[in-house]
Amino acid sequence: MLGLKLATDPRWVDIVESNIEEILTDHAYCEQKATSNALYIVINFPEHTDLVTDMIKLAQEELSHFEMVHEKIKARGFKLGRERKDSYAGEIYAFMRKGHVRKYVLIDRLLFSALIEARSCERFKLLTAQITDKDLSDFYRELMISEAGHYKTFISYARQYAEGEDIDKRWQEFLDFEASILSKYGKKETMHG
């Protein structure tokens, strides 16, 4: 369903389990960035009423996920900590087309978003299956389902606003690029790192 070319090395879960505080803080900020991304789409593409409506709902959901992760942090006696840089998302962002052709900017923003959601969903599935902490396993299962829905939303809108562009071809370019950089990631106790 997700189309990802490479799976995360299952040993990543061992790295995550070595520093739960770090993964939770990083995850919280991933949810904050997802909220900001949805709002970016609202602000920059207000002419698409259906997209705006769904991005507002998505932003609210992502913000509620941030709150849920923060509650996990507090319940474990941890503190949120400072925002972490997401080099993985930064590399995918750099792959996007930018400029003055709004259609391309919108399509690539939607595909960028779909890819981030797909990888997050894949990582949440891995955590659900392998993390020894039952509370976190259940938590990530719930979020995995949500991320899969977000992925579908972004892909659907990319198709809807394609206006003649071959979305399947562009999506494959995103997937190929992600596969080309993935070997650098999955080595830290971060969602994408």
Image (cartoon, rainbow, N blue to C red):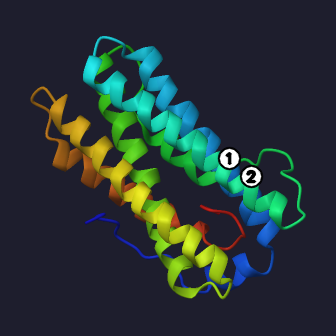
Relative placement, left or right, of 64 versus 116 is right
What residue sits 26% from the left and 55% below the top? 172
Residue 107 in picture, x, y percent from top left: 30, 32
Q: Are marks 1 and 2 in contact (CB under 8 Å)?
A: yes
To which residue does mark 2 refer? 70
Relative placement, left or right, of 99 versus 137 is left
Residue 176 in picture, x, y percent from top left: 34, 59
Mark 1 belongs to which amino acid? Glu
Any mark on residue 67, and which? 1
Q: Dot 1 lies on which element?
A: helix
Residue reaching furthest left?
Answer: 164
Q: Which quarter of the picture shows residue 190?
A: bottom right
Q: Which quarter of the picture shows residue 189?
A: bottom right
* Residue 177 makes an appearance in the image: yes
Q: Which quarter of the picture shows residue 11?
A: bottom right
Mark 2 belongs to which amino acid? His
Q: The N terminus lies in which quarter of the figure?
A: bottom left
